[in-house]
């Protein structure tokens, strides 16, 4: 199966990058999932989908930066999942508080 639109070795390079950066990826997606699901469960209005996706995207970007800098602080990247879940939980509570303030 030859794909003429991809440069040679693109799929292999992408898989190698994903294997090398696996802790960053699963920590960031854990933050996205945690923030999105908790925001959806706490907000019951019509705009909750967009608010949940915004909260998830913001937590994903924040966790990307934090998890990439773990080695600078002397921590192992094995803590990436924990960091991602904590950031996702904090992000969902911030989104919930913001929605409560905006309803006043």
Image (cartoon, rainbow, N blue to C red):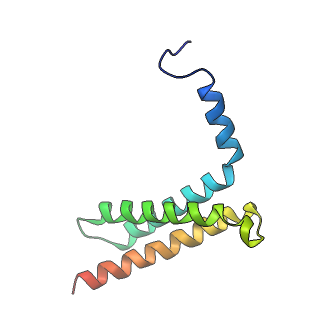
Observer-nearest of 19 and 70: 70
- Residue for point 66% across, 68% down: 82
Above or below, 100 relative to 7: below
Q: Judge whether residue 60 can be spotted in this image.
A: yes
- Residue 96 sits in quarter: bottom left
Seen from the viewer's position, the closer of residues 12 and 94 is 12
- Which quadrant is the N terminus positioned in? top right
Point out the residue furthest to the top here: 1
Residue closer to the observer: 80 or 45: 80
Image x and y of residue 41, in percent = 39, 69
The residue shown at (59%, 27%) is 10
Horizontal arrangement in the rendering, residue 17 relative to residue 29 (left or right): right
Which quadrant: the C terminus? bottom left
Would residue 48 be found to the left or right of residue 9 on screen? Answer: left
x then y, percent, for residue 22? 67, 49
Residue 90 pos. (x, y %)? 50, 76
State the image coordinates of residue 85 (x, y, percent, origin top left).
58, 67
Taking depth in this image into account, of 68 and 58 the one nearest to the observer is 68
Taking the image as shown, residue 90 lies to the left or right of residue 101, namely right
Image height of 61 relative to 8, above or below:
below
Question: Which quarter of the picture shows residue 103?
Answer: bottom left
């Amino acid at each position: 199966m030859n794909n003429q639109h991809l440069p040679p070795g693109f799929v292999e390079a992408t898989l190698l990058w994903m294997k090398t950066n696996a802790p960053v990826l699963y920590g960031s997606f854990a933050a996205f999932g945690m923030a999105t699901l908790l925001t959806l469960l706490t907000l019951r209005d019509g705009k909750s989908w967009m608010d949940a996706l915004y909260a998830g995207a913001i937590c994903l970007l924040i966790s990307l930066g934090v998890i990439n800098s773990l080695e600078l602080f002397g921590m192992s990247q094995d803590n990436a999942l924990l960091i991602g879940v904590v950031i996702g939980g904090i992000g969902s509570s911030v989104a919930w508080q913001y929605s409560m303030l905006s309803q006043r």
